[in-house]
Image (spheres, rainbow, N blue to C red):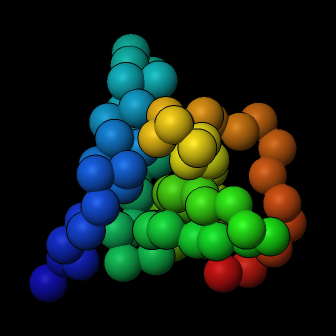
Amino acid sequence: MARRIERDEERRAYAAYFRFAKGHPVDQLAAALSGMAKYKGLEYVVLRDGSRTLAVYRIKNDGHLHRLKRWPAALDKD
């Protein structure tokens, strides 16, 4: 059974990921491995497939999501 997406930020991150990849092949996301993460006081949404991190979005103070080109290595190990 698939994990239920619990927060609006997660839904928005999924939508942004698929919108970003429009017209290109997209890696399958593993909802059970993806989700919210907190690192050094900042909140992130981490999208993963079975073996790697595909995208990381930082949740800014105003609630907007910012897709990171490089993310903290600790988020890969969560």
Q: Quadrant of the C terminus?
A: bottom right
The outermost residue toward the top is: 23
Residue 39: x %, y % from top left: 74, 70
Q: Is residue 26 above or below residue 46?
A: above
Residue 25 at least partly seen:
no
Residue 59: x %, y % from top left: 56, 47
Closer to the camera in the image, 5 or 77: 5
Q: What residue lies at 73% left-to-right and 68% top-to-bottom?
A: 41
Quadrant of res 76: bottom right
Judge left or right: residue 32 versus residue 37.
left
Q: What residue lies at 73% left-to-right and 79% top-to-bottom?
A: 77
Residue 54: x %, y % from top left: 59, 51
Q: What residue lies at 25% left-to-right and 68% top-to-bottom?
A: 6
Closer to the camera in the image, 63 or 25: 63
Number of marks present in the image shown: 0
Residue 2 at least partly seen:
yes
Quadrant of res 60: top right
The outermost residue toward the left is: 1
Judge left or right: residue 46 versus residue 73.
left
Closer to the camera in the image, 42 or 11: 42
Residue 15: x %, y % from top left: 32, 36
Q: What residue lies at 58% left-to-right and 71% top-to-bottom?
A: 37
Judge left or right: residue 18 versus residue 63.
left
Q: Quadrant of the N terminus?
A: bottom left
